[in-house]
Amino acid sequence: MVRILHSADWQMGLRARHVAQVASAVREARLEAARNVIQAANSHQVDAVVLAGDIFEDNLVEDRLVHQVVAVLEGARAPVFVLPGNHDALTPDAVYHRASWKQRPAHVRMLDGDAPVPIPGTAAVLLAAPLRQKKGMKDPTGEWRARADVDAIRVGVAHGSLRIEGKHALDDFPIALDAVARVGLDYLALGHWHGQYVHEERTAYAGAHETTKFGEDGSGQALLVEIASRGAVPRLTPVPTGSLVWRTLELDLGQDAEREAARVLGLMKDAAQPARTLLRIRTTGASSDAATPVVDRLKEGLLGRAFLHVSVERRDIPKAEVEGRLAEVVASSSLVASLLEELSRPLSPGLVDASEAGRIAARCLLSELVMEAWR
Amino acid sequence: MILRRLRVQHFRCFRNPVELSGLGVGIHVVHAPNETGKSSLILALARALFDRNSTRDREIQNLRPWGTTLSPRVTLELDSGGKRYRLEKAFLDDATSLLDEWTGKRFERLADSQRADELARGFLFSGGAQAGATKPGQWGLARLLWLGQSAERHVLPGLDTPLKARLMEAVGVAVLSEQEQGVLKRVEDAYRQFFTLKKGKVVTGSELELKAALVASLEEELRGIRAQQEASAEHARDMEEARSALGDLAGERGALEARFSALQARVEAETQLEQQIALRDKDVERQHQEWEHLDGKQRELLALRQNVARHQAVVAEKEPVLQKAREGLIGQEASFRQARELFQAQLGEQEKAEQRQERGRLLEKARQALVEQQRLDGQLKQGERLETAVEGLRRRTAALKTLSESDVKRAEDVERKLRQAQDKLEARGIEVVFKAEGSRSIEWEAEGQVQRHELAKAEQKLFAGVSAGSLRIKGVGEVRVRTGAEEIGNLQADVEKFRKELTRRLHEHGVESPQRLRGEWESQQVVLQEQAKHEGALETFLEAAGFESVEALREKRREQAGKVGTLAGQLNLAVAALATYPTHELVVLSEELRLRKQEVKEREKAKDDAEAVYRQVERQVRGLAQERDSAMQTARELELTMKAQLHALGMSLEQLGAEVERAHGELERLKNMVTGLRARLPRPEERAATQRRQLDEARERVVGAEKKAQERIIRAETLLGRAAEAGVYSRLGEAEERLVLATEEHLQLKTRAEAAEILRKLVGHWQEQVNRTFVAPIQDAVHARLEHIRGDGRNEVLSLGPEFIDAAMETPDGARSLASFSWGMQEQTLFALRLALGEMLSKQGTKPEPQLVVLDDALVNTDAVRHRRALELIERAGESLQLLILTAFPERYRTLRGMKEFDLRELAQESTPAG
């Protein structure tokens, strides 16, 4: 019997351009999630923690971060096995060659060779496929050979994409789907995909321990792997580890925008831990000129409720016709009517050099100025 | 707004109150001579309507009558919006502003102070001034309707928003609502937030610019960090390469060291052999030196011996040749001497012939000189003869008393006059005839001269031509006659005068009569002519002979005689013998000399040839003797040297030969020994030492490369460490994130800026359209009036800008600014504009109201015909407008029907307090 906590893709030092406003908070959360992994390992009293690559985002990360990671790993009661992935490949400048990493405790071991590594106190060995470059077309598990004479539980640890149609790229270290059968593995612990994914019982991606972006399903957890004996089917149990919540909210502007905004606001009224929640508002439907201020107000309202991050993704289509208060103004003002008409004609003389975004923004601005003037 | 009453006091030239009253719709002509306050009236009206009563601006202070501290005061009554108002305004010390409204019975206070000022400004849509006094540009409708005297008289008035709104209302163009104006202003503000109004450039220091700059700087920063990252990657690659190279080099070094150990034994054996060879090489060298020394000595002595023999052979060979040469020399010497003697004899012959020829030449020269001398003698004789004649004539002429023809003529003239006078006297003077009866002695005394006559019997004596005379008849008595006639006296005086003059002239030349005098002169002329003839002849002679004077000829002749004498002396002959001395022809003598010279030349050549042969033989003999002596001497010396050297060696030449043989044998033996030893060594390139050296070099190279690779690794590690320390990665992440944020914000701003720009452009287009609608009727109205004034034939049309600025006249050649036209054209256009605007405001729109139009000295540059047409327009306008015309020439407006006339001077005088 061997019990392993399988995690991967910590990507410490993540570059978070997509949520630039809260990039440092997002980075900090990944360290927090790592602590969660170690805590889970301790609480489940595992025999080993296997980190299947990409512990660091890049080999150039600062020593301060390396020290922080080492400090987290230090807290593990079981040995921790670290595999170099494509982000932290075992190149001459690898972070794992640094003095800061070499100062790690003895139970934090590198999976940097071809030889099987026994898990102390168990009848299991780890077969590692450390990556030595950022990209590669070769199957990292390709060198592993079947051994009929071994009774030990054999656990492969690799980093790359399972060769599943549409889910991998050629230079993404493609891993053959029959690796487990070919080598005679009891379990293949993989890293690279951020969403947790189990393939035919014995192969699994644990997923990133912390979500990196909106829409990344299955991330924010680790995998508890329990193998009773050589040849037994492993028992896989997901273990939540993430510290941030990433939510996407749909806002249908084809409806009454105000009411829709109120609905969304109501939806998030009782959200747990807003300070650890990142929100994305995605607008849909045909919107009127009055929609933009509504969306802006909704965003402000959510930020006012201390959500860590609120972003708006406009996917609505602006309506050509004028509605509401603006329609009333148009009826009474030849100036406003004329300007709106010009703005609705992309080929009008004033719009020859204008971009589509500029034209839409001009209509928006006009609407805003008119509303101010008629207030 | 129209004016009903205007009262001005303490205002510039109006110290006392002046009032215009009874004003209404129609034409009012206020006239006064220039500088008597017409324009001050209009200024007072403007100050009252537009200026704050409290302002103490210098402009207002200048309104006080000169030298006083009085407060300018204006009261006016006006109709506006169907109501009547009264405005009382005083400035400076008594500053007040009171506005009353007519209730139908009396005026009641509507407002005072600032509020009153504000309401007053509203009558003509003036915004007033922010501070100080207003400028004409701030006078609202007045600026449009009043054609004043200000400096801006010829400038088209501009429009502000309220004025434009009022005009738009009048021409029926929809006026913008307050909200619409608000939108326009907001669009402008939104644009101005990002761009400059004039050039449309991004506003310096604006958020847009700052954000763009931030994006640019972040991009730059990012590029820098990426470069650092790339540099780190480069270091990593370098390190990897160096590590790989280091591995290869270690293997290479190991292989080299193994080969090195294997070579060691062979190297020692080869070294020993090489040492033996080196020792033997030294022996060979030493033996070689010894052999070389002996061999050299032997060669030297043999060469010496050979030399001695050679020189002795030369001596033997030269001796008979020398003997024979000496014999030849003697024969040549005799021939040479004989040729020399023959040459000397021939040379004497030549000298003699030369002397003969020289004498012949001298004699010929002397004879020629003699002939020349004889020719000169002839010439000299002729010259001397002529000279003597000239001298004789000159002496004669010098002796002559100079007498000119004029002298002769003058004497003859006096004589003629005397004769004439005497003739006249004789004819007219007293005539006394005495006829003696017997012989009688008589004396006739007249003019103081006594003539005695002895008369025979019956002889008659006539005395005539005197004025008075006395005839004394001896023994008879004296008869005195005289006449008192003055004419006779004068004639007598003339006769006397001429007679005296003639006598004087004749006396001067020592002759008795003029005839003698002429004879004298003629003989003198003959002598002078002769002298001239001789002088001419002498001159012609000298010219022909080529001499300046006879003296020069004489000198030349003397010279020639000397020359002849000298030549005769040289020839040792008397001059007389020169001509007769016999001689050969010079040609014959020359021919003889030529023959002699030819002979001498032949002799000389023969002598020279003989001498050359002799000298050659002599040199030959001397050379042979020297060669023989030198060879003998050298042979002796060489023999002595050889003997001395052999003595020094202490052996004979034969013994020395044997010694050389021995040394050479020993040398050959040693050489063979060395060759044997060398044969035991491998070829240089195959020797162990060579291979070891190559291995050493290769090892050194490998060690160097290893060192370099290690240095590269250390360097790369250090640089990577530094990059990690410098936080390149985290800085990159943060910079990227900041750039994303900044780019997003910049994009938002840019989009908003573009939106503002688009809106502004659209608003601009809209305004252009509106302006076109608004300006066209005003242009038409102005054009109609201008056309009336100017009559037919002119087709310029006024074109106005939306704010009235940029006015131009559309001509067939394109638009020309109004300012480029004549003063007359400008003032007519501005006049027409005032009338057109006034009439529009009075008749059109939702709030038509009569307006006050002021024409202060308008149309001064307009001719009479056009002025008359302008008056027609004024008359027509007077039906709906209040026209206030100020002029110094009221007669120009006298034909206007229904106008009211005000004599400003009279009005001012009326108000002056009596006394």
Image: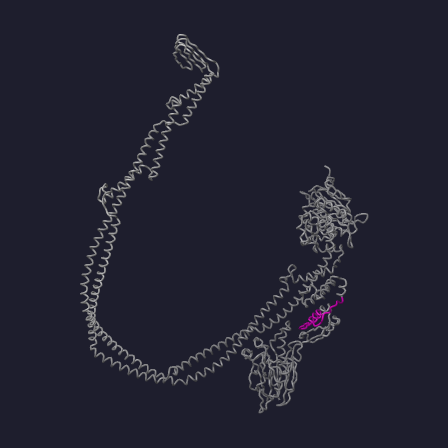
Give the residues drawn in magenta, as a range.
Answer: A295-324
Q: Quadrant of residue B688?
A: bottom left
Q: Classify residue A93 by image quadrant.
A: bottom right
Q: Quadrant of the N terminus of chain A?
A: bottom right
Asked whether B422 or B686 is in front, the reply is B422
* Above or below for B402 versus A16: above
What x and y, as percent, mark residue B671?
30, 82
Asked if residue B65 shows in the view, the reply is yes
From the viewer's perspective, tell me whether residue B755 is left or right of residue A144: right
Residue at the farthest bottom position: A149
User: Does residue B525 show up magenta in the picture?
Assistant: no
Q: Position of residue B634 (x, y in %)?
A: 21, 70
Estimate the x, y position of residue B147 in percent, counting from the top left.
71, 48
In the rendered structure, the answer to whether residue B64 lies left or right of residue B450 reads: right
- Image vertical order of residue B62 relative to residue A135, above or below: above
Label total for image = 0
